[in-house]
Image (spheres, grey):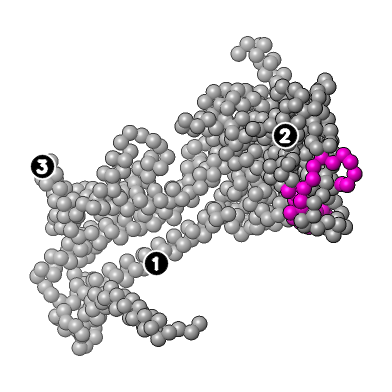
Amino acid sequence: MSNAAIKGASAERTDFAVTLDGVTKRFGGVIAIHEAHLTIRRGELMTLLGPSGCGKTTVLNLVAGFFMPDSGEITIDGAPVSRLPTYKREIGMMFQNYALFPHMTVEANIGYGLRMRGVNRAEIHKRISEVLSLVKLRGLEDRRPRQLSGGQQQRVAIARALIINPKVLLLDEPFSALDKNLRGSMQVEVKEIQRKLGVTTIFVTHDQSEALSLSDRITVMSDGRILQVGTPEEIYRCPAQRFVASFIGDANVLKGKIERVEGATALVAIGDARIPVPVTGLNKPSPNAAVDLFVRCERLAITTAKPIACTGRISALIYQGGYIDIHIETPAAAEGKVLLRLPGHGSITKWQVGETVGMAIDGTDAVAFAASC
Amino acid sequence: MPRSAFQRLLRVIGISVVVVILGFLALPAVVVTLAAFNDKAILAFPPEQWSWRWFVKAVEYEDFRAGFRNGATVTLWASSTALVIGAAFAFAIDRYQFRFKRLIETILISPLVIPHFTVGLGFLILAAELGLARGFAVVIVCHIVLVLPFVLRSVYVSLRNLDPRYELAAASLGATPGRVLLTVTLPLLAPGLASGWLFAAILSFNEFTASLFVTSQRTQTLPVAMYNYVREYADPSMAALSVMYIVVTALLLTFANAFLGLGKVMNVERSH
């Protein structure tokens, strides 16, 4: 390797913990990952988000080395690893079912990685007790995995992955096996541990709210392609593609028409309402072009004041505790029903099912894409 | 829940059928057991006077003692060798793609459907053609062929049921493929390996048809010795030996079942 190449590699090392450079993976004739480019910064929690079958788990498995890419290169800490077997990659992986070794005690499970590295017994013992305090799991060292609750098993799994000080921590849908209450508290805890240790983490999930709440950045994937990479706020507020807008958050799709274009802003007409949107999502924004306007459910309101965007019939009022969901049929403006989310407890008695109401649109964060048909 | 008379009748008939079937299954063992305790020197049923003397005679009879030693030697070698070969093939078939995989699998399983006397006769002819003495080697190889399908199936099924994520987790923690095998794969397969071995051992020890062809006076196994005995004598020591067989096999199977049960518990986490 030339000096320049070494310098290049070490410069990269300071910036990125993991990179994917044009990585493609096929299974038989099916392309699972299509020329993926991705850079993951040191210490960040990067989420791979998408529906099942989008290729997010394949990316994780490629970084782990469970299979090799067909083309492209993966680097960990600046060093190419595409041809490196898993056991040399210094990664920590946590599986959906935790994959704790059932024939070993908690202590033996956690110490496994250090034993494989030939660390001496006293040191292993010391580090096990450190990591057990980190994950708040002291006193269960001699139990078998089957004697632990789901949350405890998860703590063992994360302790086992972290004890080797991995260059990157890989989490494969780690919370999906937990019930809802436990899931919330484990999410907070894992995030805290991750931040405290500053370990670069790749987190795979299909749960968009989990992705929004835990991530430093999110990579949205669909059909083996990376659609958008950004902070949770960027992804939520400025979805770059139609799929991203519909996958993240509860979006309403309203049929509108471009009235005029002023620089980077297009004015979309829906009923009497005029909503300015950025032109980024539109291919060739021209007046009179039909567009689909994506509006978050909390940005719609029931109103009697002008301008009214559309009118519709209330088909359901659903009490959700802190807010209510109102489903409204408005065939003129949307293909299905639209969903309004209103805060407060009084709202539930304000309207009746079957009532016809007018709706106003708050244009904040609305985005438009060319009409789908 | 109220039942109609017809439903009650069906129920009675159903229970009776089950009892009759179970009775027929248990009948030979019951008859043999009762005959074994008969004091008279004939295989009579039911016995008029009870005695342990045929058990003593069976245990002291030199041909049976030699048969037991020969059988144990053959069984230990055959089932242990079959375990190693069967496990290796099971791994290869489960983990790798190669040419003629189906064909190889079929050949390995084929002794299940080929009559034992064919296998025995085949080995007898082969040994004669090759000029091999009818020593233990021929008997052991013959038994390996006969029990291999059972070991192969047992290990293969255990491998299929092994969650690959255990091995991936071990690899991610820095274990080389060899250490993954030793520290994770083999311990998790232990119940399957042990039950495969035990099953092979029981089959081998009880095997008669093929053994009749390939054993000689010097190498005859216990079932062959029993056959030779019964051709000349008809006293209840045969029945006594049969009872011992039944008891030992039942104990081994109970042990195996407990072991397999333990195996299920060990893999309990897979359920979520």
How far is disc 3 from disc 2 in space, using C-alphas? 86 Å
- Quarter in which the C terminus of chain B is drawn: bottom right
Query: Can you tell which quarter of the image residue A91 is in?
Result: top right
Query: Can you tell which quarter of the image residue B172 is in?
Result: top right
Task: Identify the subunit bearing mark 1.
Answer: B
Residue of label 1: B254
Disc 1 to disc 2: CB gap under 8 Å: no
- Tag on residue A51? none
Viewer-proximal residue, B184 or A317? A317
Residue of label 3: B129
Q: Amino acid at mark 1?
A: Thr
The disc, 1 or 3, on the residue closer to the chain's N-terminal end is 3
Residue of label 2: A292
Disc 3 element: helix
Residue A173 as seen in the image, left or right of residue A330: left
Stretch of the chain drawn in magenta:
A303-329
Residue A334 point in image, percent of width and height: 72, 41
Residue A50 point in image, percent of width and height: 65, 38
Answer few, some or many: residues within 10 Å of disc 3's Cα (few below 14, many 20 plus, some between 14 and 19): few
How far is disc 1 from disc 3 in space, using C-alphas? 43 Å
Q: Amino acid at mark 2?
A: Asp
Residue A82 as seen in the image, left or right of residue B31: right
Residue B178 point in image, percent of width and height: 48, 38
